[in-house]
Image: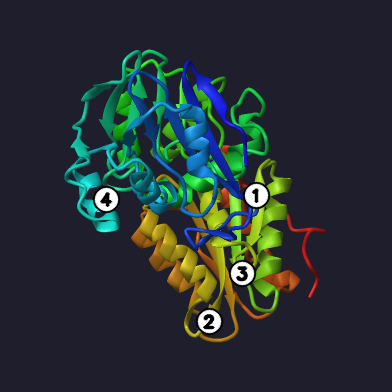
Amino acid sequence: MQTQVSIAQDIYMISVNDRRTALFENLWPIPHGVSYNSYVILDEHCALLDTIEFGSDGSYLDRVEAILEDRPLEYLIVNHMEPDHSGEIGSVLKRYPNIKVIGNALTKKMLDAYFGDLTANFQEVRHGDTLSLGTHTLQFFLTPWVHWPETMVTYEQSTKVLFSADAFGTFGTTDGAATDADTDLSVYVEDMRRYYSNIVGKYGNMVQKALAKLSGLEITTLCPLHGPVWRRQAGEVIALYDKWSKGEADDAVMIVYASMYNNTAHMADYIASCLKRRGVADVRVYDVSKTHMSYLISEMWRCRYVMLGSCAYNGDMFPAMEQLCSAMTHYGLKNRDLAIFGSCSFGGGGVRALKKFAETVGWNIVGEPTEVTGRATRENLEKFLPLANAMADHVLKVAPKQEPLACKTCCRKG
């Protein structure tokens, strides 16, 4: 059980660290765990903002009551209905049967589906509406599809605190540092980007609309439903969401390959060595069968330049590569430059399928898609040199060289 944390005047955070769950949403690995956050405001009329996942903390209601200190709990603000944040609503309703539940019209439909008809308890709010608790005044902003249709955020006007639902959240437990007074964004940025890209990333245009709605507010503190509270680095966190939701990326190259017998793997390593020799600083190589897709998706949000290589498999690309390409088609990420390579034993299919993916996703093709038949001999590796040089020219923003980089000791001899 974690102790209560004071966020601002009479605003408290209740955070639960979950290190047992292996897959967030039963899909995404969370080796560093995840936290669930809930908030309490003490005032003439006390309010609870969101709850936590059911069963993640058996003492949750006791912790709420410890903050209230015999004050009545009059309001439950529901910013987001996903079960990892609404899981304890049923328990709250049983403990406080007269509580007023605040949400928008779509919230009401979901509440009724999960907890039965709450007509007597429910109070609907619209975009821009306010609710006075006494000293604190809450203002509600609808932010649909960040990342569910009913999602909204709540702004406390006197303290300038934004209760931001899933926005600005991150994977990773807080480990005793509930606010960025005791930790740093650098500790969480990889998990935050993986959280954003996999959970919210599909809705970048809606994130941009939400940021525009909130742009006129003075925000001193971000209180997300996962991860630390951001005060010292709130501006940096907002800037990251702005960057990611626009599809902006670093001048980095990620090479993802699918290989059954290491031939395509050697080709990926050869291309990477050529890029490095040309002076490309940030190059990462991944085996699509060994690296979970969620990390690859996160890297595609980080890297402007993507190189995909696949062996042929049943006349198509390798299944794990096909799954990654299907996911990226679903997410609709734009503004990426793509190079394609691969190998086959007879009829091919991997490169052909990757070219179809490129047409579907709409990414810019760099160089000529290159496929070789057979082993990764010295002669076969040299066939990827023009593709490597084309990508290096593109990354370094230079005109193609008249005499491409010669293939020397970096090649694997046949």
Separation of disc 1 and disc 2 at Cα?
Answer: 35 Å
Labels 4 and 1: the sequence-earlier one:
1
Of badges 2 and 4, the one in the foreground is: 4
Labels 2 and 4: the sequence-earlier one:
4
Q: Which mark is residue 289?
A: 3
- SS at circle 2: strand
- SS at circle 3: loop
In this orientation, which residue lies closer to the viewer: 146 or 94?
94
Separation of disc 2 and disc 4 at Cα?
Answer: 47 Å
Q: Which residue is mark 4?
A: 111
Q: Which residue is mark 2?
A: 313
- SS at circle 1: loop
Separation of disc 2 and disc 3 at Cα?
Answer: 14 Å
Against 388, residue 68 (above or below) is above
Separation of disc 1 and disc 3 at Cα?
Answer: 21 Å
Separation of disc 4 and disc 1 at Cα?
Answer: 31 Å
Of badges 1 and 2, the one in the foreground is: 1
